């Protein structure tokens, strides 16, 4: 499979002719070759996106027509759901059933934004007797979109659907290691005939392609999802023209379990909270906080269930947890496990790479849990982004809240208890943008997604997602124009 850039309605190789290999993380085999973008490739894409925006074919298209095209994208994604899901599984490693959910969610995201642009409203104010103030929504302009590898299609779609709905033109940079489904999405854009230059795709290294999007004075907004350190770099790089910046970053989310909850249910959700996606989820519940009176029982049941998780390749129907996305990322996760041991934490389960039989050449790590952890430890403070969780004891409500908020992150968090007054009290104190009571990972397009603190700036999804990709303009209309006489004649 050969993957090319998509610029101005055409497929292109890179100006330097360089390629890179894309591998299947379940076995290390090469599954595709992709062009490796240069600064010149990005500059070309930005130039055509600017020209398409200025021509206004997309921004000025009536919302009914824009909505119809977004629905058409959703229909085509659903038509090719099985193929796209299989490619996502091969590229990212996730089990096929998880990939299918992602692809269906991607189609739903286009449908969601197709529907809300039909009902998006402005505001009017009768500000003075003969003066009306009207607030209208306008597109920001040319948007650079940079996404990570954990949900390659879905993270692209969260941004693209909202940006296009709002009338912007875009340049997308997928992760250099998982670009395949972005190419499939752009094949769909090509098929349905979006105006040339409205959607552009440039692949390659973040430090080259992504950086050029961040620094370019012809980009009006940068929307980034990825690690907090990269987000910090992008924010600095974007200062040249003070472009709008939206950042969805990392997390170290607490899952607080009180003694009055049903332990088996709490264990069930705790496993789902951390090991879904092999822990490579920004909102993963990577810190479990358990009230001391049930700590021993919780850990015992958690370990039994974690040891039962079937780890394997995504195309094996028995697989419950897939590999990590790359050898480099697996080494990073294994290094954190080593750090945890050196810091004095104790492994309750897992802790190793899996290399038995058919897993031999893949990047598999056992579902891992640390106990005897202390708040200052790196494994408690830093995002590991793998199947590694810490299980920590707390003695009362205020200590639970203190531990929960004591990291630099503020993306997600949850509380498990039968006492809804307590649940409400605690959740209101958690400094995070996405929270749950007696559940985890539930996510709907109707609600905004984003983080507090160093987990990000701005919100995706919902009407807030449309706002992110819009500028608001006030228009003041004088209904009885007359001399103002501010200065003497
Ligand atoms: P990275 O920050 O490493 O990369 C994300 C994207 O940024 C990639 O496309 C990458 O390109 C690009 N990039 C890297 N360096 C630069 C640079 N200097 N300038 C511009 N772009 C750059 O994150 P990962 O891909 O490792 O993804 C994991 C991270 O994403 C985790 O921290 C996770 O929490 C976060 N995330 C947050 C979400 C949220 O909603 N808050 C959702 C999903 C993930 P390249 O191709 O070279 O890697």
Image (spheres, rainbow, N blue to C red):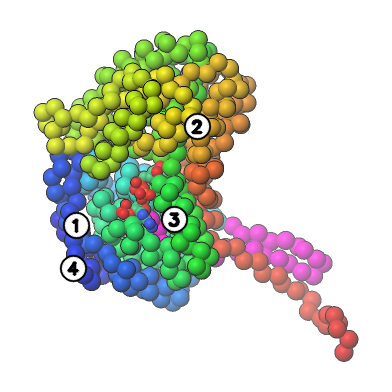
Residue at (85, 80) in percent of width and height: 486
Taking the image as shown, residue 276 lies to the left or right of residue 352, namely right
Task: List x then y, in percent, for residue 129.
Answer: 82, 67
Taking the image as shown, residue 191 lies to the left or right of residue 172, namely left
Dot 2 lies on which element?
strand
Is residue 233 placed above or below 259 in the rendered structure? below
Residue at the disc numbered 1: 20
Give the spatial CA distance, label 4 vs label 1: 10 Å
Dot 1 lies on which element?
strand
Disc 4 packing (10 Å; few <14; some 14–19; many ≥20): few
State whether label 3 is within 8 Å of ligand 1. Answer: yes
Mark number for residue 413? 2
- Contact (CB < 8 A) between labels 3 and 2? no
Tell me which corner region of the image, top left, top right, bottom left or bottom right, holds residue 92: top left
Q: Earlier in the sequence, mark 1 or mark 3?
A: 1
Can residue 293 be seen here? The reply is yes
Task: List x then y, in percent, for residue 85.
Answer: 25, 44
Our reading of the magenta stretch's main secondary structure is strand
Residue at the disc numbered 4: 17
Mark number for residue 233? 3
Dot 3 lies on which element?
helix
Give the spatial CA distance, label 1 vs label 3: 25 Å
Give the spatial CA distance, label 3 vs label 2: 26 Å
Q: Earlier in the sequence, mark 4 or mark 2?
A: 4
Disc 1 packing (10 Å; few <14; some 14–19; many ≥20): some
């Amino acid at each position: 499979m050969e993957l090319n850039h998509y610029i101005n309605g055409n497929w292109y190789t890179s100006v330097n002719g360089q390629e890179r290999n894309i591998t299947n993380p379940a076995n290390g085999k090469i599954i595709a070759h992709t062009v490796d973008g240069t600064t010149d490739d990005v500059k070309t894409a930005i130039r055509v996106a600017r020209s398409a925006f200025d021509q206004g074919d997309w921004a000025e298209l009536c919302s009914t027509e824009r909505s119809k095209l977004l629905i058409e994208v959703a229909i085509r994604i659903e038509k090719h759901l099985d193929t796209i899901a299989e490619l996502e599984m091969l590229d990212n490693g996730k089990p096929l059933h998880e990939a299918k959910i992602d692809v269906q969610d991607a189609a739903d995201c286009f449908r969601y934004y197709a529907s809300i642009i039909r009902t998006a409203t402005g505001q009017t104010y009768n500000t003075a007797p003969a003066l009306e103030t009207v607030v209208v929504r306008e597109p920001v302009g040319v948007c650079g979109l940079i996404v990570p590898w954990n949900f390659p299609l879905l993270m692209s779609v969260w941004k693209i659907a909202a940006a296009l709905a709002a009338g912007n033109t875009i340049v997308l940079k997928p992760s250099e290691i998982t670009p395949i489904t972005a190419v499939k999405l752009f094949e769909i854009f090509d098929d349905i005939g979006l105006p040339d230059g409205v959607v552009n795709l440039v692949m390659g290294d973040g430090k080259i392609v992504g950086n050029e999007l961040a620094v370019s004075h012809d980009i009006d907004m940068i929307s980034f999802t990825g690690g907090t350190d990269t987000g910090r770099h992008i924010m600095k790089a974007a200062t040249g023209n003070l472009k709008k910046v939206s950042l969805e970053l990392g997390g170290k989310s607490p899952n607080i379990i009180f003694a009055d909850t049903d332990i088996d249910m709490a264990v069930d959700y705790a496993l789902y909270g951390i090991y879904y996606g092999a822990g490579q989820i920004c909102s993963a519940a990577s810190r479990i906080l358990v009230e001391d009176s049930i700590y021993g029982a919780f850990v015992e049941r958690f370990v039994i269930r974690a040891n039962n998780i079937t780890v394997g390749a995504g195309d094996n129907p028995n697989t419950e947890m897939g590999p990590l996305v790359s050898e480099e990322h697996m080494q990073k996760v294994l290094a954190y496990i080593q750090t945890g041991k050196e810091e004095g934490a104790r492994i309750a389960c897992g802790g190793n790479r899996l290399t038995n039989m058919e897993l031999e050449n893949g990047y598999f790590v056992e579902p891992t849990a640390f106990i005897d952890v202390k708040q200052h430890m790196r494994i408690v403070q830093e995002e590991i982004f793998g199947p590694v969780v810490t299980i920590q004891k707390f003695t009362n409500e205020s200590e639970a809240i203190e531990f929960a908020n004591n990291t630099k992150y503020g993306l997600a968090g949850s509380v498990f208890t039968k006492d809804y007054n307590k649940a409400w009290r605690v959740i209101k104190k958690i400094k995070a943008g996405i929270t749950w009571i007696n559940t985890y990972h539930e996510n709907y397009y109707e609600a905004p997604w984003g983080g507090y603190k160093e987990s990000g700036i701005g919100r995706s999804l919902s009407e807030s997602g449309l706002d992110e990709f819009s500028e608001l303009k006030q228009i003041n209309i004088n209904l009885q124009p007359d001399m103002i006489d501010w200065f003497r004649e």
